[in-house]
Structures are given as C-alpha cells and as structure tokens.
Image: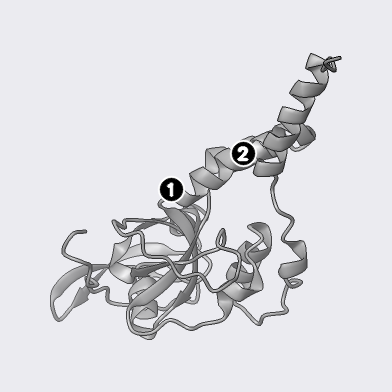
Amino acid sequence: MTERIDPLLAISDQARRVLEQNTIVDKSTRVSPAGALGLPPLLDQRRIEHQIIDSMFDAACAFDRIYVYQIPPQHVIDREKETANSPLAVTLSAGYRNTAQDRAHRGVIGAAGLSALDHLTAHGMGLGHIVNFAFFSILRNYPDKDENESLVPLHAGQVISSEDTQRLLREGKIHIVRKKTNDGVRHLYRLEDGSEYLPEIPWAPSEY
C-alpha cells in the first residue's frame, strides 16, 4: 500500500531545506569584543556593527592599496532591521542579502597602505569609512577558511565617494576651505584636528 504524504508536511520539508540553504550564519564567536584588536575607533565600531570576523584584519596593506569589506546597500540593511522581529522573514532574506552584499560597490575600508592613507586623509576619508567604489575585477582575498568572507583589494583611486565624509561635512566636523598654495588657489579639507592636506590625484587602473 502506497503511503499517503500529507501535502502540508511536504511543503514544510521543502521550506526547511530552503531555510537551511539561506540561514544567516552566526559569526559572533569569530568577532572579538570591542577594543580587542587595537583598531581605530571608527573601524572598530564598524567591525562590530557589520560583524566583520577577526581574520579580515590579519594583514596590513602596502603602497596605495586598500582592503574593503563589502556590505549591502543601506536599503537592504534597513529591510533587515524592519523584519528583525520575524525570524522567518530574516532567514528567507539571507540569500538575498548575501547576493546583494557580494554585488555591492559599497564597503568598509579595513586597511590601507601608507600612500593610500595619504590620499584618503587628504580627501577627508580614513579607516572605517563606508565608501562607494569602482572595480571591474573578480579578484578577492580570502583570509579565512569561510569562502563567504572576503576582502576586495583596490587602489585608493578606485574609491568614488565616502558616506562618512558627507556625514562629517553635515555635522560641521570637517570643512572644505579655499587656500592659496604654490599651485594657485586650491580646495582643501580642514579636518577635525584643524590639519589640512594638499590633495593629489591618486593612480587608478586604466579601465576605471
């Protein structure tokens, strides 16, 4: 006699498999407490906020290179917050979130070489800033055994904009000033500590 399968149970089993494939992984055991890695305050804040695992900070960049940890667009993050009280909705959106993050030209600057730091600072940016960037390469660095965790290596010149620089301008913590230099009148950022840096155009790949 053929066993009759309850359609509701079948649907439930199918849903279970979908949930298993799209479950958000708890990374809390791989993210050290605030202050444990000796990072600058903003970068440490972003590390905790976006649950960036410790191994993403195992190497220092050289020259004009930066490492960016991709994060999803803000509307995806906002959607997650809206569905925080609905476990099913959060779980079902995990696959969408991972895809959105992998495709996003948005991320947190996690490391920068000395030349890159000069360029970033002169343009009102720094470690921990959320930036938008341009890249046309599938190149990734995987410092961890988890292939879902990677860093995007870029040249400083591939950064297009900083959401944090715009925030600091709005808050009046940094300012754009005009200053007479040997090259004529130039626009400079006056940073929170009062320092000013003459910006230079950083190198960027020809396909940029």
Q: Is residue 91 left or right of residue 120?
A: right
Residue 77 x, y percent position in the rendering: 60, 43
Is residue 62 placed above or below 78 in the rendered structure? below
* Quadrant in which the N terminus is drawn: top right
The colour style of the image is one colour
Q: In this view, does 135 lie to the left or right of 70?
A: left
- Please tell me whether mark 2 or mark 1 is closer to you in this view: 1
- The answer to whether residue 196 shows anywhere in this view is no
Nearest to N terminus: mark 2 or mark 1: 2
The residue pinned by badge 1 equals 103
* Quadrant in which the C terminus is drawn: bottom left
Kindly identify the amino acid type of the residue bearing the numbered disc 2.
Asp
Kindly identify the amino acid type of the residue bearing the numbered disc 1.
Arg
Number of numbered labels in the structure image: 2
Residue 51 x, y percent position in the rendering: 66, 60
Tell me, for residue 193, which label it has, or none.
Answer: none
- The answer to whether residue 65 shows anywhere in this view is yes
The residue pinned by badge 2 equals 78
Q: Distance between the residues labelled 2 and 1?
A: 17 Å
Q: Residue at x 75, y 34 (%)?
A: 16
